[in-house]
Image (spheres, rainbow, N blue to C red):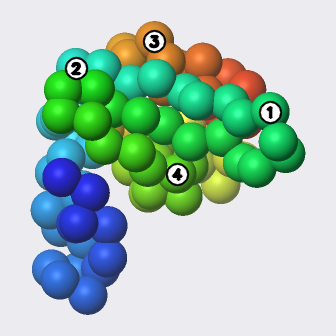
Amino acid sequence: MFNCTSPRVDKGQFRELIIYFDLLEHLDFINITTTNQSPSFFRVNNPTINTDSEIINAYIKLNDGGKLLKSAFGQNAILFQYCEGKGYI
């Protein structure tokens, strides 16, 4: 699912389609915040996949002012909160 982040594969065209069609919107994300100063990460449930914010950010498009244009996560509440916290919204 996340292996299309590199533009080396297809110049990023597949990732653009994932963003365009909001294909990650219905995944069951959890934002895991750790207590030992290590960075938070995201967990997708069923199947369980852990990923960091760098991968998540690859599926978020921002305008020149750093505001959200579009993401592959559509109206997913957890990722909406993430974007709010980052100041994208």
Q: Secondary structure at mark 1?
A: loop
> Between disc 4 and disc 2, whose residue precedes?
2
Residue contact between numbered discs 4 and 2, judged by CB atoms under 8 Å: no
Residue 83 percent location from the top left of the image: 61, 30
Q: Nearer the viewer, residue 36 or 63?
A: 36
At label 2, counting other C-alpha atoms closer than 10 Å, the crowd grade (few under 14, some 14-19, many 20 or more) is few
Amino acid residing under circle 1:
Thr
Mark carried by residue 52: 4
Kind of residue indicated by mark 3: Ala
The residue where tag 1 is placed is 35
The quadrant where residue 9 appears? bottom left
Q: Which residue in the structure is indicated by mark 2?
A: 26
Q: Residue at x 68, y 30 (%)?
A: 33
Report how far apart the C-alphas of labels 3 and 1 lie in the structure.
23 Å
**Looking at numbered disc 4 in the image, what kind of residue is underneath it?**
Asp
Examine the rendering and report whether any part of residue 74 can be seen.
no
